[in-house]
Image (cartoon, coloured by chain):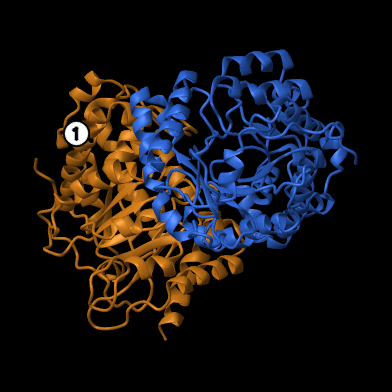
Chain colours: A blue, B orange
Amino acid sequence: MTVTNTATPFAPIQNDTFLRACLRQVTDHTPVWLMRQAGRYLPEYCATRAKAGSFMGLATNTDFATEVTLQPLERYALDAAILFSDILTVPDAMGLGLSFAQGEGPRFATPVRDEAAVAKLEVPDMNKLRYVFDAVTSIRHALKGRVPLIGFSGSPWTLACYMVEGKGSDDYRLVKTMMYSRPDLMHRMLAVNADSVATYLNAQIDAGAQAVMVFDSWGGVLADGAFQEFSLAYTERVLGQLKRTGVDGKVVPRIVFTKGGGMWLQQMAPLDCEVLGLDWTVNLAAARALVGGSENGPGKALQGNIDPNVLFAQPEQIATEVGKVIDSFGKPYQGSGTGPTHIFNLGHGISQYTPPENVSALVDAVHSHSKRVRI
Amino acid sequence: MTVTNTATPFAPIQNDTFLRACLRQVTDHTPVWLMRQAGRYLPEYCATRAKAGSFMGLATNTDFATEVTLQPLERYALDAAILFSDILTVPDAMGLGLSFAQGEGPRFATPVRDEAAVAKLEVPDMNKLRYVFDAVTSIRHALKGRVPLIGFSGSPWTLACYMVEGKGSDDYRLVKTMMYSRPDLMHRMLAVNADSVATYLNAQIDAGAQAVMVFDSWGGVLADGAFQEFSLAYTERVLGQLKRTGVDGKVVPRIVFTKGGGMWLQQMAPLDCEVLGLDWTVNLAAARALVGGSENGPGKALQGNIDPNVLFAQPEQIATEVGKVIDSFGKPYQGSGTGPTHIFNLGHGISQYTPPENVSALVDAVHSHSKRVRI
């Protein structure tokens, strides 16, 4: 498969704070971006989505995807952009038929629920995902080097949850029934998913992504033991296949975020990735002590972890809560080598009900408070 | 308030395995009971509920509540009974108007969302909850000492979630908005809830409950820091007011279960309770090392923690998973004093879709495997 438009060189990076923090290098402030920062809480996003007609109409159109990816950067001093897409594009390309009914979550027309359906699964033709790679290249050009662009995918387990359930679930009964009663089928599905995700992320890297993130959104619903066997092992399988450098020869940091995975941080420490994402239940000081590493020693950069509901408070209260999170991590590494660093983010995607002006309060508080902490 | 029928003495206990394990004393097998063991997965429960007309019709009728509480004991060799009721009876008695629409979760007619509504809250007249205490006494008599009876309540925070949201929630946006923007209101609500829960549990103890459990079902949705301030502190306030002994002069063990609270076990260790409940994300060996205590030293008995979805596998697979959980805790204390003990349970309520025969496989596996572990 050839990827269009990477022949034109990308502009040099102007704000590499996020990339440096991923690599546990010194930065003058704590970089910040927000999961789902291009989304429904922004009126301009809703306007573009209305033009596109549907969520998939938006995601599959290069111009629209580029437009909405850049929208939050026009409003806020964010330190990274993230590709506008969905975690379920890969199973859609496998032929499961993804759709988004208005006001509902994603849904697959043909969920994978038996041996025959699992046997048919294979790594999809990446040409079916060309719209994603085209969007990556287009966004990277449109960014003109302002901030780095993050590519992403759902984790093998998280994809499997949706592939078996066919939609979101309260109890993950169907996918866990398969896991407990036919672990052989589940392992086959996860292997296909892992190889698909790796191929998919590599194509995003080739298209211009400067960092990649694996969203293990549903890893935290697994029991201890099952998490290691059915989620973590396949995230590892993805990481083992990823390209280390992007089109410009620079290192492409990998971020792994298991929502609800705070119990397993120590077991995630050996993962071949640079950054671990954390949700709001995790104490950052404890996480730093456990996996953040020390000066010039190995360790993970930590990303997270404020509760997105903080954004429903008043600006002064938001600033206070931001300060608590930054202080909980403590002073990041300030030397010339590598050491513990923090990337500020929410602990989950931003709510569609968030007042947009409150996001300014959060982003500005991260920058100002984190500069004060460094003094 | 007077409680009926405790004048007639209760029959002496025949199977005190559960109570002994709560007190970290030796038992010949690991006791087992299941959260929501009297419930919709049992056809006989559905039949009684149909007679009662509604969930509240069932819960408020002493005979029906007694009948359904005993139903699972007829089928399975369970080591404890738990009062059939709901965690939301207390806010209902506060006047919020609890109802259960068919096929939906609980709903309050008048949620608590502003300063005026919070100001009006007070500890409800326990006579409005007389049906609960009557049920406790009736069940205790009907049990004839076969196994102990557990009483329960929602935690102050969990009640507040429903009181503000008015129903179940995906994101807890309304209750967290109040918490972050008006912490003063939230603290007032939680204080009233804590005093109400304590009064309610004490009345259950007076009516014959032999153990009590606080369900902090939604503690795990809180951020680190917020959990300690808005959930744990008020669970502590409840525990501080509880009677230590029941109508027969015996110690009434207290169980605290925070779903999703595995991150905070160490901070729960000082709680004035005998047992900590754990969900399936927790590694039992690690929890035992952290809070299980040592021989004749202080510590908590641990309750849990198999994934309820295991019950959708085949009986042999269920037995294997039961074995893993029991082995993960390891050999319980076997001496003549006190030491680490385990009470087997699910990590959450049993699913309404569970095949009833699979519950036999689980209960029998707990008994047989845990006897083998003791040899």
Which residue occupies the extreme bottom position in the image?
Answer: B375
Query: Does residue A121 lie above or below B169 as drawn?
Result: below
Q: Quadrant of residue B183?
A: top left
Mark 1, residues whose alpha carbon is within 10 Å: few (<14), some, or many (≥20)? some
| Image quarter (top left, top right, bottom left or bottom right) of the N terminus of chain B | top left
Q: Chain of mark 1?
A: B
Whether residue A160 appears in this view of the structure is yes
Residue B280, x across and y down, in percent: 47, 58
Q: Is residue B280 left or right of residue B310?
A: left
**Who is closer to the viewer here, B58 or A112?**
A112
Which residue occupies the extreme front position in the image?
Answer: A336
Residue B290, x across and y down, in percent: 35, 66
Q: Is residue A164 left or right of residue B122?
A: right
Residue B20, x across and y down, in percent: 26, 71
Amino acid type of the residue that numbered disc 1 sits on in the rendered structure: Lys
Residue B370, x across and y down, in percent: 43, 76
**Who is closer to the viewer here, A302 or B27?**
A302
Residue placed under numbered mark 1 in the picture: B128
Question: What residue lies at 37% left-to-right and 49% top-to-bottom?
Answer: B68
| Image quarter (top left, top right, bottom left or bottom right) of the C terminus of chain B | bottom left
Mark 1 falls on what kind of element?
Answer: helix
Query: Does residue B306 lie above or below B17 as drawn?
Result: above
Question: What residue lies at 27% left-to-right and 42% top-to-bottom?
Answer: B229
Question: What residue lies at 85% left-to-right and 36% top-to-bottom?
Answer: A128
Q: Quadrant of residue B119?
A: top left
**Who is closer to the viewer here, B267 or A145?**
A145
